[in-house]
């Protein structure tokens, strides 16, 4: 169970990094920022916190729910399942901490990669 949670965290972080920072998605991000500036979609794919929240929602709905495995049941609020929402927030928080740690290491030891 704990291995799956660690794997879920790595997957959320990896997908978020590919969407937000990779050269592969750079034309897609540029297109969205150019043509959808009034819409939230342009910002969604350039923001680590925003993207990781939605990646967490989607992964927990279709693949694995860390909150279900931690608590043993789906969290409900007035008969609405909020486990997926909690997982999205959890994914966002963890990815933010990993990104912060990465930035601190980069600042302390110089730039780790030359992607831009």
Image: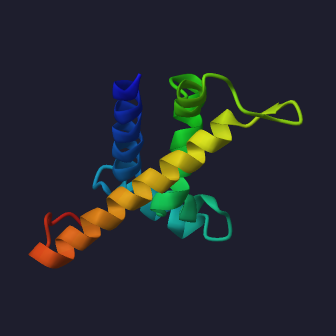
Count numbered badges in the picture: 0
Q: Quadrant of residue 105?
A: bottom left
Q: Residue furthest right?
A: 78
**Residue 91 x %, y %:** 49, 46
Q: Is residue 20 left or right of residue 87?
A: left
**Residue 22 x %, y %:** 30, 54
**Residue 27 x %, y %:** 38, 57
Along the line of sight, the residue nearer the viewer: 103 or 66: 66
Q: Quadrant of residue 39?
A: bottom right
Query: In this picture, is 45 found above or below 18?
Result: below
Residue 27 can be seen, yes or no: yes
- For image coordinates 87% across by 30% down, the residue present is 79
Residue 52 can be seen, yes or no: no
Q: Is residue 95 left or right of residue 34?
A: left
Q: Quadrant of residue 107?
A: bottom left
Query: In this picture, is 77 found above or below 116?
Result: above
**Residue 47 x %, y %:** 49, 63
Query: In this picture, is 11 found above or below 112?
Result: above
- For image coordinates 58% across by 33% down, the residue present is 67
């Amino acid at each position: 169970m704990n291995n799956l949670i660690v794997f879920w965290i790595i997957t959320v972080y990896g997908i978020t990094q590919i969407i937000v920072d990779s050269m592969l998605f750079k034309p897609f991000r540029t297109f969205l920022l150019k043509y959808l500036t009034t819409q939230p979609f342009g910002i969604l794919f350039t923001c680590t916190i925003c993207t990781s929240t939605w990646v967490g929602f989607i992964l927990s709905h279709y693949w694995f729910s860390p909150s279900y495995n931690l608590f043993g049941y789906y969290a409900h609020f007035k008969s609405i399942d909020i486990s997926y929402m909690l997982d999205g927030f959890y994914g966002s928080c963890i990815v933010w901490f990993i990104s912060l740690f990465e930035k601190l290491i980069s600042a302390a030891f110089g730039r780790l990669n030359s992607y831009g």
